[in-house]
Image: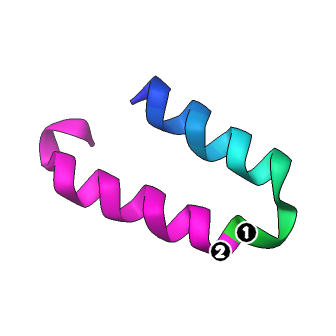
Amino acid sequence: MSDVAFVVGSRILNDPDGIPTALRAFHRTMRELGPSSG
């Protein structure tokens, strides 16, 4: 979880224009990990 958040956060910091894409990737990863991740 923390690793995913770090990667997404880094992507947002490095490429502000890529925020929507980063968020979609984050939500997709959360769904793939399953309900156990919250």
Q: Position of residue 21 (x, y in %)?
A: 59, 72
Location of the N terminus (image quadrant): top left
Whole-angstrom CA distance, mark 2 to mark 1, is 6 Å
Identify the image quadrant of residue 37.
top left
Can you say whether 18 is above or below 3 in the image?
A: below
Q: Which residues are magenta?
A: 20-38
* Residue 28 among magenta residues: yes
Question: What is the x, y in percent for residue 16?
Answer: 85, 62
Residue denoted by label 2: 20
**What's the magenta bit mostly, secondary-structure-wise?**
helix
Observer-nearest residue: 23 or 36?
23
Looking at this view, is 2 or 36 the one in front? 2
Task: Tell whether label 1 touches label 2 (CB within 8 Å).
Answer: yes
Q: Return the residue at label 1.
A: 18
Dot 2 amino acid type: Pro
Q: Could you classify mark 2 by the number of other residues whose Cα lies within 10 Å: few (under 14), some (14-19), or many (20 or more)?
A: few
Hey, which residue is sitting farthest top in the picture?
Answer: 2
Q: Is residue 25 above or below residue 30?
A: below
